[in-house]
Image: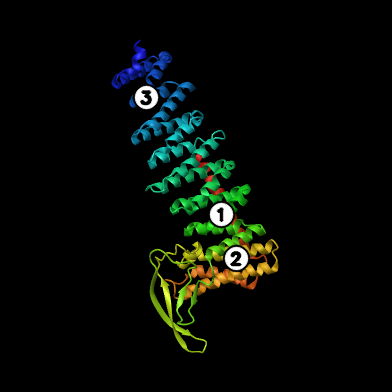
Amino acid sequence: SQLDQLPAWPDILQLVVLDMVRSVCRTQPESKGKYIKLILALMSSQHTSVAYECANTLVQLSKASSAIKAAASCYCQLLINHSDNNVKLIVLDKLEEMKASHPEMLKEMVMDILRALSSPNVDIKRKILDIVLDLLSSKNIEEVVLALKKEVVKVDDLSESAGEHRQMIVQAIHKCTVNFPDVAGAVVPLLMGFLTDANTVSAIDVIHFVREIMETNAKLQKQVLELLIDIFPQIRSTRVCGCSLWILGEYSETAEELESAMEVIKESVGPLPFFHIDEEDGSVRIDMAEEERGGGGSGGGSSGPKVLADGSYATVSATTMGAAATFTASPNLRALILACDYFLSAIVASTYTKLVLKMKKVGAAPAQLNKCAAESMLFIVSLLRLSESGAVSHSIDSDSKDKIDLCLNILGKGQYEEGSILTELLTECRQSFATMIAEKNAEEEKEAQ
């Protein structure tokens, strides 16, 4: 019959038939049931435009779940199989409309929609993730997270948009774990591997995600802390290091955790002091702990008077480090400190101080407590001497110096009793972060409504 041959007709004739069907159904709504079969037959057409129009017509003419499901399936096939990005974007707009009117139906097709993430286009990926994240449910969350985990691993680090792709997927996983905390344990170990990512933006997203997990998911705190301590020496981004140090200082609670945190910071800072003075010629030499590699090595030398043991003067030749100097073979914190990152240096001092105060609270032995306090003060004094040595490109700023001086004052006087300053250091900062998270979640819930 002609009906059986309909899918083989040219696309123009098929579209004419489809237009006639719509016209008849508008004038004779009681007859539209018998035309659904015709539309379903046309949906198998090899012509993309015909299949797309069939799906649109089904959505317009029928509210039956079978018809809606067939239309959604057709949209998904077009999204996956068509190579034209403009077609994909148009189809995604249709799925966005269906999401508002038939969300339960689309929830069953989330995995089909996610298959289109293979597209390299950033706008398409973003639209797909936006749709999928609004369709999450307890039934599909595990499959969605598993698919996103595979996708984040597949991102090609050599492509120009790799950082943006990974950032979008990390943010999507973050939202999944906020709405369904039980899946966090499955993704945190994988994501923490990206803290060493050369793309700083995606690494920052990951550490912010980890920080929020530490506050909102108490069951994962111990596991995440152990992973962070293991990976910390490999982190090279100053912002990621700063956030990691804050986590170590705030969430290390047991004696074992405090000791491990102290050790990894010491390892990352390297041997102290940061420089030494040659006894023979009085020159100041930066101790990079390892051989310096990369561009921007030593700059010009500066000289100044130095008083020797017998009271006479000697010339000091200081090896100055330009702002662009890199220390790729040095421990991570040491490299950043030698590059004059005094804001991070103040965070290190603050973290040391928090850890020492917490050791006192957990009842550490006096000898161990004094040892850790002395090591912390040695770091602070070495930092201040480095800043004033003339061996680095510029000295410490006043804000960072005030914070470091406060830490030195607390450690030096042994003021471990509860007080306003100690309360701010140990409790108020974390309380403020918890309040910020609660407010952010409340805003997101309000926007979703």
Q: Distance between the residues labelled 3 and 1?
A: 51 Å
In this view, the residue in front, 366 or 69, is 366
Pointer 3 with pointer 1, Cβ within 8 A:
no
Q: What residue type is labelled 2?
A: Thr
Residue at the image position 46 percent from the left and 63 percent from the top: 329
Give the residue type at disc 3.
Ala
Q: Position of residue 29 (x, y in %)?
A: 41, 15
* Secondary structure of the residue carrying numbered label 2: helix
In front here: 296 or 291?
291
Q: Is mark 3 on a helix, strand or loop?
A: helix
Residue 64 visible in the displayed image: no
Q: Residue at x 50, y 35 (%)?
A: 135
Residue 23 position (above or below residue 318):
above
Q: Does the CB distance between marks 2 and 1 fall below 8 Å?
A: no
Q: Residue 51 carries which label?
A: 3
**Disc 2 or disc 1, which is closer to the eye?**
1
- Give the vertical position of 21 relative to 315 (above or below): above
Residue 7 appears in the rendering: yes
Q: Mark 1 — residue?
A: 228
Instruction: Kindly indicate the quadrant of the structure image that contains residue 89.
Output: top left
Of badges 3 and 1, nearer the viewer stands 1
Residue linked to disc 2: 353
Q: With 300 as the anchor, is 228 left or right in this view?
A: right
* Looking at the image, residue 265 lies above or below residue 102: below
Q: Quadrant of residue 256?
A: bottom right
| Residue 304 position in % (x across, y down) | 43, 82
Q: Is mark 1 on a helix, strand or loop?
A: helix
Of residue 277 and residue 246, the one placed in the foreground of this image is: 277
